[in-house]
Image: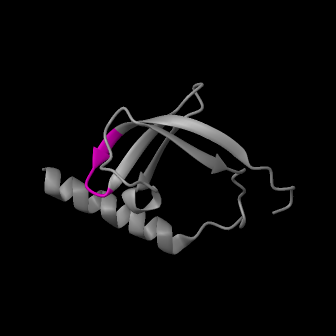
Amino acid sequence: MKYGDKIIYMEGIIVELKDGSVAIDFKGRLGYLKVPMRMLINDQPLQVGQEIGLNMSFVEVVNEQVNEEYISNIEKRKEKRRQNNG
């Protein structure tokens, strides 16, 4: 990273549980994050409304070039959804 790493503790609320994913609204209107369930450390089943905490750093763009393979995969996924929905 070009800038010094500064770890920031953030808290949020679980607002959605789906097949293998957890959606979190951060406190203080700091945004929304959806992550795979495997990224959460927990001993009990997850429930909507539970509070979470995480250490977060800054997000940095590491390459100015667009990764065309990812763009192609995103477009293929969108097209497949369109075909399945009608």
**Going 18% across and 58% down the picture, which residue do you hit?**
83
Does residue 60 appear left or right of residue 3 in this picture?
left
Q: Say above or below: 48 vs 75.
A: above
Was residue 17 drawn as part of the magenta stretch in this picture?
A: yes
The residue most toward the top is 28
Residue 45, percent across and down? 30, 49
Residue 71, percent across and down? 48, 65
Q: How many marks?
A: 0
Which contiguous range is marked in magenta? 16-20
**Going 31% across and 40% down the picture, which residue do you hit?**
47
Nearer to the camera, 78 or 52: 52
Q: The N terminus is located in which quarter?
A: bottom right
Was residue 36 drawn as part of the magenta stretch in this picture?
A: no
Q: Say above or below: 20 vs 53.
A: below
How is colour applied across the structure in the image?
one colour
Residue 31, percent across and down? 55, 34
Residue 84, percent across and down? 15, 57
Q: Say above or below: 81 vs 34.
A: below
Q: Quadrant of residue 40?
A: bottom left
Nearer to the camera, 42 or 33: 42
**Going 48% across and 69% down the picture, which residue do you hit?**
70
**Going 74% across and 49% down the picture, which residue do you hit?**
7
Does residue 33 appear left or right of residue 36 in this picture?
right
Dominant SS of magenta comes to strand
